[in-house]
Image (cartoon, rainbow, N blue to C red):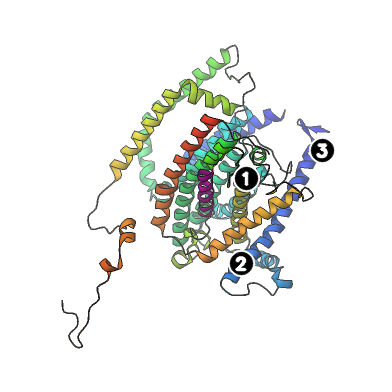
Amino acid sequence: MLPVIAFYVLSATAVGAAFMVIAARNPVHSVMYLITTFFAAAGLFVLMGAEFLALLLIMVYVGAVAVLFMFVVMMLDVDFVEMKRGALQHAPMGIVVGGVLLTEMILVGAASLTQSDGGVKFPEDGTSNLEAIGNVLYTDYAFFFEGVGLVLLVAMIGAIVLTLRRRDGVKRQDIAKQIARTREGGVELVDVVSGEGIGS
Amino acid sequence: MVVFGIELSWLAVKLIQIGLFVTVLLVGLAFLLLMDRKIWAAVQMRRGPNVVGAFGLLQSFADFIKFVVKELIIPAGADKVLFILAPILTLVMAFGAWAVVPVAPGWVISNLNLGVLYWLAISSLGVYGIIIGGWASNSKYPFLGALRSSAQMVSYEVSIGFILITVLLLVGSLNMTDIVDAQAGGFWHWHIALLDFSNPKSLLLFPVMFYMFVLFFISALAETNRPPFDLAEAESELVAGYQVEYSSTAYLLFMIGEYLNIVLMCAMTTLLFLGGWHAPIDIGVQFVPPFFWFAIKLVFMFFMFSMVKAIVPRYRYDQLMRLGWKVFLPTSLVAVVLVSGYVVMFGHLAGGG
């Protein structure tokens, strides 16, 4: 009984919050609703017995990705009138993307329903789902996993290369240089003759 | 009686446990706060709070009453809902993470198998209280403080994650109770000082794990916005950072949340590196309850936090980021490689004496 109630409450929250992400007028509120959606999704994962995935979702998406979203959104100075004007123009593209996603989801749902074992496979030999995920990622598909890692690394380096600007005339702290500085190199003692200063 | 598949007596027991835990935690926190101020005062050759109660023992409770009876001022132009939500969120997350902290054998609200991960997930949410509070205030200094602090917390979370992985690899479990039990049998089994001479190859781990402890301690300082990393509320630059506009109970909630996080970090250091509730030497001290050892280690860690606050000057922001990303992250990554190499070669560190 309780799992069923929990499922409906969580999925209703997820759908409602996901709707509010696009309906909210304030972008910061949108991010807050997005976080609510993540939480509801994590709750659904727990209901399915995938508590590792749930915690990972919260840790990675809510704890890091959404923080960055928040960061960007807070510092943006968005003109909403301008954005609303463009909305109609982008609507066909949005409908295409939404349609593709909807079709895919219906396909996956239908396929998993018609499958004899219900689609969700639990490890039978008593391994926790942490170990099960570890086996899949690091043993069965280790090379693909490392390949994905490399792709991410390339993406990261690409982002840095695109945004890194070398500016001249910027003073930078070189710690090794500071530490290597000695009294001989840094201080010059001058006997000043009264009334003449130290010259140049 | 069973309602919705839940045994009511079980629910009642859990609720009583939680109530007791929270009460003990809050009362303990009041005295830890006083201890913090007393230590700080002592370092600066002052008396510290000494008026309310004997030796100022009741100072925290007096402060509490004072905060509660003040007026809550919501700035004009502030986002009211989020402004109120932020301190509540901070406090709830700070309390929530305590659910998986075992304080003695079996004394834990929820003995989760993924306890460490749960703690990491909840503590990564703590940043929202700060960032929302800073933004919702609709003011410059809180906003700058919030931006600084969230960037800082996200950065140091990464190295904390890697440090946790080294401990988890050695223990082979994410359950907090298992982690503590793996350190049973004397201080030479604690992860801070792996000096078990009967098992010579484990000595290889000592320098790595000791370094991990130092890193964890410093990262904990940064993660909880404690000096020398309190750039979020650097009073010389940002007045008080994200909490400038907060007053009364809302400020109190922020402060309690912050201190709860600090004490939680002390508790985690105790559990992960200092052997939790295990006595330093197992012989002749069986009459001491395990909770005592946990509490004394926690208070010791809190003392260290206070001393750092009292004697260390504040970091500059770029130095903070350099330390996090260019020193802590690569070295903790190397430590993960070394420890996993050890585990592959020799297997998990055998716990128990």
Which of marks 3 and 1 precedes in the sequence?
Answer: 3
- Residue at x-position 54% and y-position 16%: A110
Chain where mark 3 sits:
B
B20 relative to A82 in the view: left or right: right
- Read off the residue under disc 1: B188
Please check the rendered image and state whether residue B346 is part of the magenta-colored stretch, yes or no.
no
- Read off the residue under disc 3: B9
Boundaries of the magenta span: B206-221
What amino acid is labelled 2 in the image? Answer: Ile
- Read off the residue under disc 2: B39
Which of marks 2 and 3 precedes in the sequence?
Answer: 3
x then y, percent, for residue A156: 35, 38
Could you say whether the residue bearing mark 3 is in a helix, strand or loop? helix
As drawn, the label of residue A51 is none
A102 relative to B265 in the view: left or right: left
Location of the C terminus of chain B (image quadrant):
top right
Out of A29 and B318, give the one closest to the viewer. B318
Nearer mark to the viewer, of 3 and 2: 2
